[in-house]
Amino acid sequence: MSINSLNFGEKGIIQNIEGNSKLVKRLY
């Protein structure tokens, strides 16, 4: 894997966490 793909993976994980937190706030 290249450095670019690793950076993209980290950004994807961060976006997933932010999206999940928004869903939790919406539910509760």
Image (tube, rainbow, N blue to C red):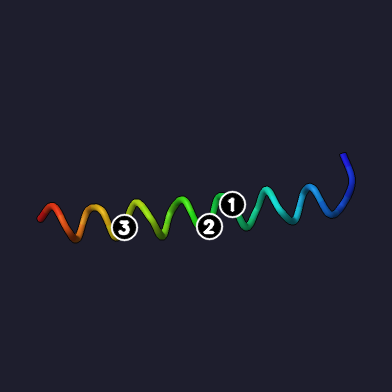
Q: Which residue is mark 3?
A: 21
Tell me whether the residue at label 1 lies in contact with that at label 2, contact meaning CB atoms closer than 8 angstroms. yes
12 left or right of 22 in image: right
Q: Nearer the viewer, residue 10 or 19?
A: 19
What's the residue type where badge 2 is placed? Ile
**Mark 1 surroundings: few (<14), some (14-19) or many (≥20) residues within 10 A:** few
Identify which residue is drawn at 25% across, 53% down.
23
What's the residue type where badge 3 is placed? Ser
Q: Which residue is mark 1?
A: 12
> What is the distance, in whole Å, between disc 3 and disc 1 at their CAs?
14 Å
What's the residue type where badge 1 is placed? Gly
Identify which residue is drawn at 43% across, 54% down.
17
Which residue is the extreme one toward the left?
A: 28
Q: Secondary structure at mark 2?
A: helix
Q: Quadrant of residue 26?
A: bottom left
- Whole-percent x and y of residue 1? 87, 39
Q: Which residue is mark 2?
A: 14
